[in-house]
Image: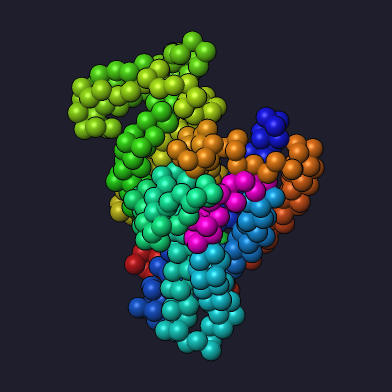
Amino acid sequence: MEEALNVHRLHFAFTVTFHYIFPQLTMGLALLLLYLKTKALRRGDEHYNRAARFWGRIFGINFALGVVTGIPMEFQFGTNWAEFSKAAGGVIGQTLAMEGIFSFFLESSFLGLFLYREKKLGRIGHWWAAFLVWLGSWLSGYLIVATDAWMQHPTGYKLGADGAIELASFWGLVLNKWALWQYAHTMLGAVQTGCFVMAAVGAFYLLTKRDETYGRTFVKGGVLVGVIAAVLQLFPTGDMQGRMIADNQPPTLAAMEGLFDTQQGAPLAILGQPDVQNRRLDNPLEVPQMLSFLTYREWTANVKGLSNFPQDQWPDAIPLLYYSYHVMVGLGTIFIALMLLAAILLWRGALYRARWMLWLLMLSVPLPYIANTAGWMTAEIGRQPWLIYGLMRTAHGISPRVGAGNAWFTLIGFMGMYTVLAILWLFLIYREIERGPGPGDSSNSEAAIAMAAD
């Protein structure tokens, strides 16, 4: 049973991690598409329409891959996690069904209109198509996050006579306070992915001296939106997410911070290696009293360490949780510094000539993907050993009739298929970038320079 449990967990971790490569970009680009279409509508400028069409094609590629890789996850609830689905399906089925029926169809329908019916829709109709693509994309994200947030902090439920978890309050489910802050934090992470990708493509065009007008537009849009998203990711959304963990999952907070002993004026660990066996953090680099202040707004507040809780309540894989959390926070700090520096250069009119910064923007593309993955690992590993926090242990949620061998067979199959999909995705994205935003770019003209500077 232990082997099967580990394989089922690895199976879902692999599929959800690979899947989230695509929706984080589409959700981020949805906002940026709306930004470009708004500029086009206000100015009546074909330049921004061409820019929006270019990113619409990239959005469509990511959307298609996201659908293909997302469908197996829905089936895994029944194939790999049947006991969980049996117990909690009456609750999570609400948000998952709404995501599929309402938001997914809203997004996909108007994406088709956005990509293929621009002339028939007209300028205003095409803007509305972009708006509804954004609305469907972000509504889809909310319903998925609300499902996960219920597993982190279950609300709006009751226990039936047979032990099944039943929905008692629909609004308690969808307006879970955990969902509200987790959603804001998650969507800002997606926006940062979209901003870094847009800025990186723009930097590539500027460095290679092709499509330079569009390159300036992409770099400017990515930096302006990205710097706002990077700051909001830290505060208030990241701060509030951390405080909710402290209030509702204190063993998780202690494991994330490598805090084994309860302390007054607890320090914030910047670096260090958690030694679970000896219950200590080796080679720590710490900021004195900072964890107490960030958690409770008091420098000498008491913060409970792992030793304060029974060991069966400790999160699984504490070192992995600790490192994933610190990777997320570390990269988030880098994003703020990088985007602020780029914004200062943009304000001074030096960004488009600063080749070192353009190289930094272009080479930073993988970092938001790593940060978002580390963030989800922190959330999901931190919830363990609970599948539904305080209600169902992870070990009790798997399908008892699906053995480790069967799970390994499908996992290996998924790895093979997803490798092919990854190669196809890279090829299609490369082809679109090579194709460029559109013909007729006159990057050295005074009009082009003035347009990008607006």
Q: Residue reaching furthest top?
A: 278
- Which percent across, then down, holds residue 264? 25, 19
Position in image of residue 141 (x %, y %): 48, 58
Residue at the (39%, 50%) spot, across then down: 155
Which residue is most to the bottom? 120
Q: State the colouring used for the structure image.
A: rainbow
Instruction: Residue 326: tell me if it is visible.
Output: yes
Closest to the observer, 20 or 146: 146
Q: Is 292 in front, or is 179?
A: 179
Q: Is residue 69 visible?
A: no
Q: Quadrant of the N terminus?
A: top right
Residue 209 in the image: x percent, y percent?
54, 58
Q: Which residues are magenta?
A: 80-95
Instruction: Work out whether residue 257 or residue 189 is closer to the camera in this orientation and state it.
Output: 257
Residue 92 lies in the magenta-colored region: yes
Residue at position x 63%, y 56% in the image: 74
The residue drawn where x is 37% and y is 48% is 178
Q: Image quadrant for the C terminus?
A: bottom left
Main secondary structure along the magenta-highlighted residues: helix
Q: Position of residue 368 (x, y in %)?
A: 49, 45
In the image, residue 408 sits, relative to residue 205, either above or below, namely above
Task: Check residue 335 for magenta coloring.
Answer: no
Instruction: Tell me where residue 363 sits by quadrant.
Output: top right
